[in-house]
Amino acid sequence: MGSPNDEERAPEPPARRALLARLAAGLAHEIKNPLSTMSINLTLLEEDFQPAAGGDGEPSARERRALKRIHTLQREIERLEGIVDDFLRYARGGEINRAPTDLVQVVREVLELLAPEHEAAQIAVHTALPSRVPLVMLDAGAFKQALINLLVNARQAMPGGGELIVEMRRNGPTVDLVVTDTGVGMTPQQLERCFDLYWSTKKGGTGLGLATTKRIIEQHEGSIAVESEQGRGTRFHVFLPMLQEIAKRPVEVVEARDSGDRDREGPRDVEVER
């Protein structure tokens, strides 16, 4: 799958990555300091428009308008801080420190972290994970960020709720981690550009989430692929090389749990269809 911006995503020399990371850190510091000052002063201003303790009466129409504008500015500051954080994470993408890691456990931890958000968005989460797989060389923190980006992207593609399916299976010498959503899907043009820097179809999107995910996965000597159909959903495949197994016997046990099944029955076999 080609893209007009493929050359932008070509591997960067280590010296250039280090320079980009330093510049990004300095830029983030210079931007976030005044944003923090503005946020603090808006909070103080908001307090000035709140009714005094023990006072009577509601805010006037003028005060309500002022409060509404204050809240708008606060949201915009939060959005700008998010853009800066996304850029900083992308720029620091080369700073990874890998070690043998249980990929299943990492996936479980990320799903548990995001469970409240999925529940609030009325998204049913289904998993099909092996009881154990050979270890993978991971920077757990960096890879968690990549997986969070994928899961947040899936949730945002299902604004009215839906289903999120997370599967893992062996594919030769690699493990294939599959994230499927039943969301709005992508057009062929959107599919071609989804990993491009600063390109996003979401209102307020930075266009850095999937680009960061792709960079992190490639720095783990892995790859990512995507398939999507408009109106039916999207499926991402993350391929990572496995470490040489100590025990050669195959693993057959599969877990399938819905987000609401945690306190009920144990693992059961599952067949996931699309």
Image (cartoon, rainbow, N blue to C red):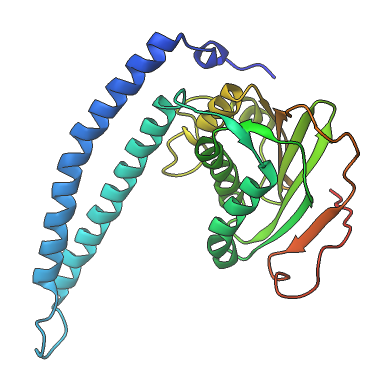
Side of 138 where 16 appears, left or right = left
Above or below for 232 versus 238: below
The location of residue 24, given as percent across then percent down, is: 31, 25
Q: Quadrant of residue 32?
A: top left
Side of 44 where 158 appears, left or right = right
**Considering depth in this image, is 38 or 28 the residue closer to the camera?**
28
Side of 174 where 7 appears, left or right = left
Image point (81%, 40%), residue name:
169
The location of residue 189, given as percent across then percent down, is: 64, 28
Side of 47 where 257 appears, left or right = right
Question: Considering the image in quadrants, where does the N terminus appear?
Answer: top right
**Considering depth in this image, is 104 or 256 the residue closer to the camera?**
104
Above or below for 266 versus 149: below
Residue placed furthest toward the front: 246
Q: Quadrant of residue 92?
A: top left
**Considering depth in this image, is 205 or 126 the residue closer to the camera?**
126
Q: Quadrant of residue 260?
A: bottom right
The location of residue 242, given as percent across then percent down, is: 74, 29
The location of residue 204, given as percent across then percent down, is: 41, 43
Image point (30%, 50%), residue name:
78
**Considering depth in this image, is 92 or 32 the residue closer to the camera?**
92
Q: Is residue 248 visible?
A: yes
